[in-house]
Image (cartoon, helix red, strand yellow):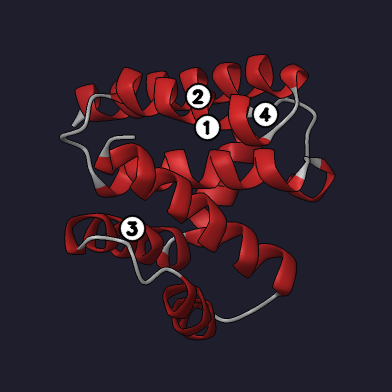
Amino acid sequence: MGSRRKSRELLLQMLFQSDLGKQPAEQVRRTFWAEQKDASAEVRDYVEDLFNVATERAAEIDQTIEEHAKNWRMERMAAVDRNVLRAAVAEFLGKPDVPKPVVINEAIEIARRYSSPESITFINGVLDSIARGLEQTAEKQ
């Protein structure tokens, strides 16, 4: 598994822990990294960068997801799906140099591993819509 894939999977796990455990970011960091001693510095740095974006811009990220997930509220989404979406949108926002199709493909592959088969189409559609919206916004600026 490549370091970016590993980073994205660890980010999903951190977001999931934060979401379901209702834990503050610092507590998640402390307990999560205590268990992940084998993560390289490169992986850890990438995860930390994206976790910071995801937590600092959580309201914006959730609002963006809800706007593009027609008729779905965040609390109604499966926890894994909700956090796969959050991780991908955090990467869109925090790592604009990473091509959006790569982020989407990685999110889909992670969803294949951790979520249900029905979730893949949903995640793909929401992320594609968000990516197009971000590109349109960038073109206007």
Q: Residue at x 53, y 77 (%)?
A: 28
Q: Which mark is residue 110?
A: 1
Q: Which residue is mark 3?
A: 47
Q: What's under tag 1, amino acid-wise?
A: Ile
Are dots 1 and 3 in contact, CB under 8 Å?
no
Would you identify the image quadrant in which residue 97 lies? top left
Q: Position of residue 36 (x, y in %)?
A: 42, 68
Q: Do the numbered discs 1 and 2 sit on residues whose CB atoms are within 8 Å?
A: yes
Task: Look at label 3 and name its amino acid.
Answer: Val
The amino acid type found where label 2 is placed reads Glu
Q: Residue at x 27, y 49 (%)?
A: 94
> How many angstroms separate mark 2 from mark 4 (CA)?
19 Å
Q: Amino acid at mark 4?
A: Ala
User: What distance separates the C-alpha of mark 3 from that of mark 4?
Assistant: 25 Å
- Dot 1: what SS? helix
Q: Is residue 119 toward the left or the right of residue 133 in the image?
A: right
Circle 4/circle 1 CB separation < 8 Å: no
Secondary structure found at label 2: helix
The numbered mark, 4 or 1, whose residue comes first in the sequence reads 4
